Image: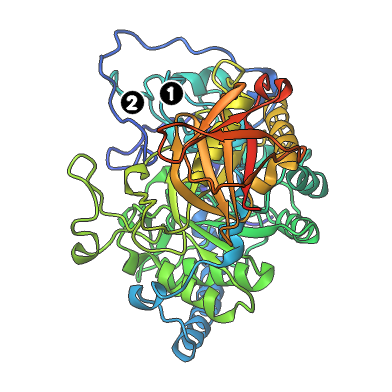
Amino acid sequence: MKKISALFLICILSPLSLPAKTDAVTNAPGETAVLKEEAETLPDYPLAPKKYRRPSGFKPSLYKYSLKQMSEKFSEETIKAARAHTARVRATNEAGKWKPNGKSLDEHECPEWFKDAKFGIFIDWGLWSLASWCPPKKEGAMYPDWYELRMYSNFDSKSPFWGYRNYHIKNWGEDFQRDHFIPLFKASDFNSEELAELFSECGAKYVVPFSKHHSGFCLWPSSYTHRDVMDMGPKRDIMSPLAEACKKLGMKFGFYFSLSEWEYPLLKEDGTLANFSWNKEIPYSDDMEYKASGKIAVKDFVNEYIIPQAAEFIEKYSPDILWFDADWADKASALGGYDIAAYFYNISQKPVAVNDRYGLGEPDEIKGRFTAARPRQWLRTIRGDFFTDEYGDTSECIDIENYHPWEACRGISQSYGNNWQDDESNVISAKEFVSMFADIVARGGNLLLLINLDGQGAIPEIQMKRLKEIGSWLKANGKAVYATRPLRPFTKNGISYTRSKDGATSYAIISNPSRKTILEISVPDGAKVTDVAAGNTLEWKFVKGGGGAVEVELPANLANSNLPVAVAIKSE
């Protein structure tokens, strides 16, 4: 039997409940950090449904090696392989067209297929999905996918996370640590083919799974860690069948990749370990044993882990999209994203796209780019083939007049990650959903819709329902959405306007249809106006004194529709 450290046994058996570090990042970008009023007592959160709490008789266990043992067994070989891999990346970039710097990457254009796609699926699924919870709030984004970080603290009485630890103890137990979720993560209900078929049927053109979130747990077999689905949890490759199923059905496939992690073991020159948390070196602490298990200590987090790990994924799965995250952790020049993106461009034999989450910008890059009311340091909406907006966190920076491809990533509720509390009371209706989607497209954006699988990989019923509803609507009205471009006045009075790329056809998506609807776009004399879904010709006339606006008469079935109605305007 291999020797196991006393510390490792303590981590398994002791009911440790260390508080969150005071210098740790506790907020996902876009979250409100402070409540207006201080709470008087700890909230009495409910007992979760059975599938979202500790299984009866479950005995916590961790990975077979401690972090020290991992470093002794695997660090030397892994560091050597990683350095060689990073050297190959750098050699490729040195010889290739695209260089790992902002000036070069800014010259890369977003592919036409991304501009045309309009609708993608963001699979927010990982260890956090077993708990599927965060404290409820009336408005603003909620992040159940940060559960693993926040489960160690009750925070303070003005925090939206007040009482977090109490909820965890009530539903999982005081002795249940972050990495005790891993043995429970079996992916027993995850079916790649069925998911891909559903996404295709609902009208999605690309799929981006959360390949590696901030805890560092990988949904593919990675050579640079044991913290992955092959060595732990399901003990099988999740990514290959999903990538193959999506590509078989003609959907593009993306790679979500956190450039930083909550904890990572660093190997110091004297052989001791430190913690590289959010790209800052801090002392090793005992809680890393149950928060970072399976990770192989390296000396250089970026060059011996981040760059080679991302390059390995790109080489193996040939994704169409790189979707970086954790860009708030450090400057872009220090996070490794420039090297990875340049390599992605240089080796891809097809048009590919990278988002805007490279990291924090230099002073000259961000000067004058953000408002005084919402000052930023990141490069979002500055650098990237497409910009990203997360529940409105960059909305004021999206300039429709100076078109640049962008993407709204959000769910059908406030939740980023599955939330067992979601129901019809906080999930947007099908009508609200389609109206929101139409508005995004009219302003030149794509919608990357969060699909939050449960702990074993099944889609909750309420999300399945919305997918089918939007799929049905898109099947009938997709011409007004796919491969369109913005058309002034974009969205006005509940009507979203788009146009075909050749400019021959204009579209109006009417959120609140009525028998007589005013369209505030220029319609040429003699134009033909039709119902997009059925192709029926509609009566219309110019509005007297309306400056070119027209009145369209909708038949009763369209005027009484519970969902938005799309009409097409084409010159004869």
Residue 376: x %, y % from top left? 25, 49
Q: Which element type, helix, strand or loop, lies under badge 2?
A: loop
Where residue 138 appears, as percent x and y from the top left, is 43, 18
Residue 518 against residue 28 in the figure, above or below: above
Q: Secondary structure at mark 1?
A: helix
Q: Residues within 10 Å of mark 1 (few under 14, many from 20)?
A: many
Most distant residue in the bottom direction: 95
Between 558 and 562, the residue placed more toward the observer is 558
Task: Please name whichever residue, 447 or 242, is drawn nearer the observer in this view of the structure.
Answer: 447
Question: In this rendering, is residue 165 above or below 503?
Answer: above
In the image, taking residue 257 as reference, residue 530 lies left or right, namely: right
Read off the residue under disc 2: 155
| Callout 2 touching callout 1 (CB < 8 Å) | yes
Residue at 54% of width from left, 12% of height from top? 46
Is residue 11 shown to the viewer in this render?
Answer: no
Which one is in front, 384 or 326? 384
Q: Which residue is mark 1?
A: 164
* Amino acid of disc 1: Tyr
Q: Residue at x 56, y 75 (%)?
A: 77
In this view, 102 is above or below 422: below
Q: Residues within 10 Å of mark 2 (few under 14, many from 20)?
A: some
Separation (CA) of disc 2 from disc 1: 7 Å
Is residue 497 at least partly visible in the picture? yes
| Left or right: where 359 falls relative to 476 | left
**Which numbered disc flags the more N-terminal residue, 2 or 1?**
2
The percent coordinates of residue 63 (x first, y second) are: 61, 49
Q: Amino acid at mark 2?
A: Phe
